Image (cartoon, rainbow, N blue to C red):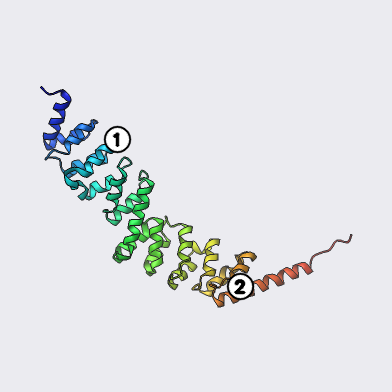
Amino acid sequence: MLPEGEVRIEHARAASVGEINSLVYEADEKILSALLENPNFHEKHAELLAARADVSQVVLGALAEADKGKWMGCEGVRLRLAQHPHSPRRVAMAAVRQLFPFDLVRLCFLPATPPDVRRLAEESILARVPHLPIGEKLTLARRGPSRVAAAILAEGHPQAIKLALANRFLTEGQVLKTLAKHDLKDVVVAIIAAHPKWSTLYSVRVALTRNPSVPVERVKGFLGDLTLRDLTDLAQLPETAPDVRGVIARELERRKAKSEKEDSGAIVTPA
């Protein structure tokens, strides 16, 4: 007669679909591993198992390898294995590489997603961006992670630019990196320079001023807010456009004249 534990394991291997619906919540790793050998174990069971917060690394690894990796071929299972904090790293990374773009976006924003998995998810999206249809790019521009929104922004599609700049996840740092690109399209610079949010940030204004494609009329609107030191540095940069450099020179002259006037009008107290 088999011990009770062995009896339960054997039962798990031959349980019906209805029984598996309950057994998939068992705590015993041996029973869960036995379920993976059951021919009645289906995709919905694999998803339920991978969705359990308390399931162990051993069981998740076994699930990924069961039936020659059959369950890794299911999108729902892959997503759950990719985001699970207990997934073996190799399993999580393999799952990420097979996810669809919008599942990768979901993965990036899940709080429990391990940092290295989140980073790989972003990189996977970035690698696919150039090959995506415009409809998907527009959606990613609007709600994708900061790096993804910035990548689509840099491509220069007018509608995508506006959506990316309105993306609540886009950061100042990513906008600055975009403006620093040597092959950035003129339309991107022009739209950023006219944007009601980004064009008001000091660091963005400096980056715009040094960009050779910036419309000079836009620069005139905020040049007076830049510090004397930044204006002096910008005037000496080789990448600063000649017409912008001329505007900077006039602003420097204006400030110099204003300073001299103030100095000459100062009241000197006799000793």
Asked if the residue at tag 1 contacts the one at tag 2, i.e. Cβ–Cβ closer than 8 Å, the answer is: no
Q: Amino acid at mark 1?
A: Asp
Q: Position of residue 102 (x, y in %)?
A: 30, 55
Task: Tell me what residue is drawn at x 20 percent, y 36 percent.
Answer: 33
Q: Is residue 93 visible?
A: yes
Residue 230 position (above or below residue 53): below
Q: Residue 73: horizontal and vertical position, in percent? A: 20, 50
Task: Identify the image quadrant of the C terminus.
Answer: bottom right
Q: Is residue 90 left or right of residue 183?
A: left
> SS of the residue at dot 2?
helix
> Which numbered disc covers residue 248?
2
On-image quarter of the N terminus? top left
Characterize the local packing of mark 2: few (<14), some (14-19) or many (20 or more) Cα atoms within 10 angstroms.
many
Of the image marks 2 and 1, the number of the one nearer the N terminus: 1
Residue shown at the point (58%, 75%) measured from the top left: 245
Measured as percent of width and height from the top left, residue 72 is found at: 22, 48
What mark, if any, has residue 54 been given in the picture?
Answer: 1
At 36% from the left and 55% from the top, the residue drawn is: 122
Measured along the vertical axis of the image, is residue 160 above or below residue 60? below
> In the visual, does 148 lie left or right of 197?
left
Amino acid marked by disc 2: Ile
